[in-house]
Every structure is written in structure tokens, then in C-alpha cells.
């Protein structure tokens, strides 16, 4: 049953296993981590413990299977489908945060030079720790570590789709939409500044393969705020 679940999850993110890039895997000596990297596109990798990870473009993962623990160090964004093992927890370390699971499906995102760490859970249960605080996350929940704060939210976006510019929102606030923009348009969206009060409007909509500029233009019609995009920086004002 686990093999079928893995196949279905990989199909959902539209990254077939045939795209596994063996040339981007560097296997360490005994006790040393195995390195995985997605260079010019998202790639799917089967880990030695039977788990699967989908890495986004420009992302890297170092994985060590120690028998009684499984440890991963992530740079970038990854969708993890972890094989369940009660006696061998799976830990992802990235930035200032750590995510621990026994077996589940979840995503983690952190990029070099940024404090922000985002975790979203699709199946199962994870624990996220950052600084001196921790949160428990179930399916349909997410948490973000940024500006020294760990914030837990109900997820309002659709399933994680690594390597895709497709976003689906259900009753999402402006702040929640911005979090998804940071993920989907990472590298192109260089920064966001809020110069306004909170917005009570919640939107249900979707975007697929649109430019960042066209998404911002449409969001201006949904929210009672002014969204201005200039040289990759998004400013939101009253």
C-alpha cells in the first residue's frame, strides 16, 4: 500500500519517477551523507530508507540514514513522502528550524540568505521547532518561521506542486496569498513590504502559469489594497 501511495503522490506533483537524475546524486562513504541536487528543474529522488523527496529547482539535500535516526539537511524546497518507521524518526534541518516525523507527507522550504522557513503538512503529523518554540502540525496545517516568530495557520492553498506555477486558494487572506507568492515565485519576487492595516477580505481563486505581474494585477481587483510591483519588490498599501 505504501508503494501505491508514493506513486500517487509523485503523480500529483507532476514529477514522474522517470525524471530521477542519477547524475545529481553523490553517495558518501559509510556514515557519510548522500547528497541530492536539482539543478535546472524539479527532480524526484528515492532515498535509501524507501522514502521519496521531490526537490525544487536549485534545491539540495544531504541525507544520512543512521539506523535509529534519519537526518536530512535541506537548502531550497522539498516535498517529502516519508516511509513510516516507529523506531527511526525522520528529521529535516533547514535554516533555524527543524521538522521531525515518523512517516507522513509534508513540504519544507528555506533558501540561503533568508530567515523564513515554511512547512506544510499534507498527510500525517509533524513537529516543527524553531528558536525555543515548537508547534504540532496535522494534515491541512502549516507553519512559518520568520522575523523571529513561529506562526501556525490553517493551509488555504492546494496540494504542494514543486516546479509548478499553479496556485489554488480557498478563503485565503492577503497575508496567506503573499506567503504562497513567496514560494511560487521565489527568486523573481525579491521582497514584500506591508504599508497598510490588515485586510478582512478572503478570496477563493486559482492561478496557473501566469506571470507575477499578471497575478499582482488580478489581486488588486480582489483586495481593498494597492499592490505595486517594481523591480521584483511588492509593496502593499491602503
Image (tube, rainbow, N blue to C red):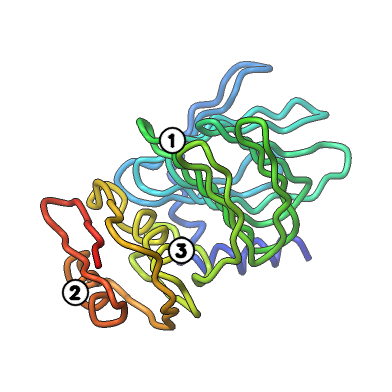
Determine which of the numbered discs, if any, sits on residue 206 in the image: none
- Number of marks drawn: 3
Q: Position of residue 43 (x, y in %)?
A: 43, 50
The residue at which mark 2 appears reads as: 217
Which residue is nearer to you in this view: 230 or 113?
A: 230
Mark closest to the chain's N terminus, 1 or 2: 1
Quadrant the C terminus occupies: bottom left
Q: What secondary structure is marked by label 1? A: loop
Gap in angstroms between the C-alphas marked 1 and 2: 28 Å
Which residue is nearer to you in this view: 139 or 29?
A: 139
Which residue is nearer to you in this view: 31 or 218?
A: 218
> Callout 1: 10 Å neighbours few (<14), some, many (20+)?
some
Mark 1 or 3, closer to the camera? 1
Q: Position of residue 56 (x, y in %)?
A: 41, 49
Quadrant the N terminus occupies: bottom right
Q: Position of residue 18 (x, y in %)?
A: 47, 57
Determine which of the numbered discs, if any, sits on residue 115 in the image: 1
Q: Is residue 112 above or below residue 44?
A: above
Q: What secondary structure is marked by label 3? A: loop
Q: What secondary structure is marked by label 2? A: helix
- Residue plotted at (65% across, 27% down): 64
Q: Is residue 63 above or below residue 227?
A: above
Mark closest to the chain's N terminus, 1 or 3: 1
Q: Position of residue 184 (x, y in %)?
A: 35, 59
Gap in angstroms between the C-alphas marked 2 and 3: 23 Å
- Residue plotted at (75% across, 25% down): 66
> Callout 3: 10 Å neighbours few (<14), some, many (20+)?
many
Image marks 1 and 3: residues in contact by CB distance under 8 Å:
no
The residue at which mark 3 appears reads as: 161
- Residue plotted at (51% across, 72% down): 158
- Residue 119 lies left or right of residue 31; in this view the side is left
Amino acid at each position: 500500500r505504501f508503494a501505491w501511495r508514493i506513486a500517487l503522490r509523485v503523480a500529483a506533483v507532476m514529477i514522474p519517477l522517470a525524471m530521477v537524475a542519477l547524475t545529481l546524486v553523490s553517495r558518501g562513504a559509510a556514515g557519510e551523507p548522500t547528497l541530492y541536487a536539482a539543478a535546472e528543474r524539479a527532480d524526484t529522488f528515492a532515498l535509501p530508507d524507501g522514502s521519496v523527496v521531490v526537490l525544487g529547482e536549485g534545491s539540495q539535500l544531504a541525507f544520512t540514514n543512521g539506523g535509529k535516526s534519519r537526518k536530512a539537511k535541506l537548502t531550497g524546497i522539498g516535498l517529502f513522502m516519508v516511509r513510516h518507521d516507529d523506531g527511526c524518526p525522520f528529521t529535516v534541518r533547514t535554516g533555524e528550524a527543524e521538522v521531525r516525523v515518523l512517516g507522513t507527507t509534508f513540504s519544507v522550504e528555506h533558501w540561503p540568505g533568508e530567515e523564513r522557513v515554511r512547512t506544510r503538512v499534507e498527510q500525517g503529523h509533524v513537529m516543527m521547532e524553531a528558536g525555543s518554540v515548537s508547534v504540532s502540525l496535522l494534515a491541512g496545517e502549516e507553519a512559518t518561521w520568520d522575523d523571529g516568530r513561529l506562526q501556525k495557520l490553517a493551509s488555504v492553498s492546494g496540494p504542494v506542486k514543486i516546479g509548478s506555477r499553479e496556485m489554488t486558494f480557498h478563503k485565503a487572506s492577503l497575508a496567506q496569498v503573499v506567503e504562497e507568492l513567496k514560494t511560487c515565485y521565489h527568486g523573481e519576487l525579491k521582497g514584500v513590504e506591508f504599508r497598510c492595516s490588515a485586510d478582512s477580505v478572503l478570496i477563493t481563486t486559482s492561478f496557473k502559469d501566469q506571470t507575477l505581474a499578471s497575478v499582482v494585477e488580478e489581486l488588486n481587483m480582489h483586495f481593498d489594497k494597492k499592490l505595486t510591483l517594481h523591480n521584483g519588490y511588492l509593496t502593499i498599501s491602503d
